[in-house]
Image (cartoon, helix red, strand yellow):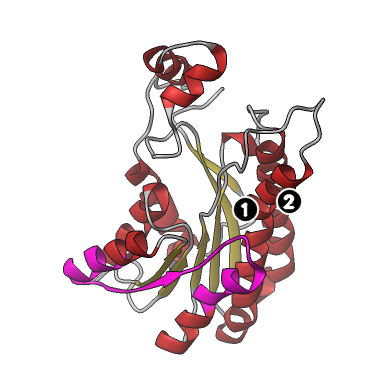
Amino acid sequence: MGILDNRIAVITGGGRGIGRALAEAFGAAGAAVVVSARTTAEVDAVAAAITAAGGRAHAVTADALDRHSAREPVRVAMATFGRCDIVVNNVGGTIGSGPSPFTADDESFESTLVLNLTTAYWTTSEALPHMRTQGFGRVINIGSGAARHASGSIAYTTAKHGLIGLTKQLALSTARHGITVNCLCPGWTNTSLVDFDRIGARSGASAAEARSQAEADNAQHRVLEPEELAPMALLLASDAGAGITGQVINVDGGYRL
């Protein structure tokens, strides 16, 4: 018996990195997983891997920057499985170069806000009425070290801080309906979004120097693997996590203590 047997989970941004790790972990724990991302080949591969391991999965190609497309994974879950028990909002990243405070770049700023904050609202708002009817729901927003600290991008930091506000307000507003809402924050994690060549180039450092600097940010002096977020995510998504809501939980190796 798996900890998520008979649950239906939607995981956005699930084509690679943390999203893929969580999708595969949820599938192994017994959930049927609707996994979405912008790149069809990536989500198809994740769904195939879950199915090959004996789980149930459905791939959805969705553009998180579009309000209608962002809601589609939940609609597919309802149409395919008749329920939506869990939503993991994992979509994120920075669009553009990260605007300088002295040079306005409205388009990049607004797009980064949508990608990291607004799309989580869109996807969650599609699921909440169904969760209320069911009397059960779990929403896990994937934050970042930038949800608590300043980072290299004004827009990204602003959006991730906003995600904490969304988490807490939704938790308060839905708590009496059997729904929990939490924010799970990784720190430096070994994904394709963490490009130490690019990070080092910003300050004239080598990739090795940039990685060493990142490791020094952590009490454990290492970059975590995506799979290390899975145990906490599984707890938050399960019946055992019923008493945990409105929380910001770090799985980050002791990032910037």
| Residue with the mark numbered 1 | 115
Kind of residue sitting beneath label 2: Gly
Is residue 5 positioned above or below 134 on the image? above
Is residue 70 positioned above or below 222 on the image? below
**Disc 2 vs disc 1: which is toward the camera?**
1
Identify the residue shown where x is 37% and y is 15%.
Answer: 208
Q: Give, as a single range, the part of the protein colored magenta.
A: 47-74
Q: Earlier in the sequence, mark 2 or mark 1?
A: 1
What SS does tag 2 mark? helix
Which quarter of the figure is the N terminus placed in?
A: bottom left
Q: Quadrant of residue 215?
A: top left
Residue 177 numbered mark, or none: none
Q: In the rendered structure, does residue 62 fall within the stretch colored magenta?
A: yes
Using the image as rendered, state which of residue 170 and residue 198 is in the foreground. Answer: 198
| Residue with the mark numbered 2 | 165
Is residue 16 positioned above or below 120 on the image? above
Kind of residue sitting beneath label 1: Leu
Q: In the rendered structure, does residue 89 fall within the stretch colored magenta?
A: no
> Where in the figure is residue 138, as x and y percent of width and height?
53, 67
> Where in the figure is residue 241, as x and y percent of width and height?
48, 60
Q: Quadrant of residue 124?
A: bottom right
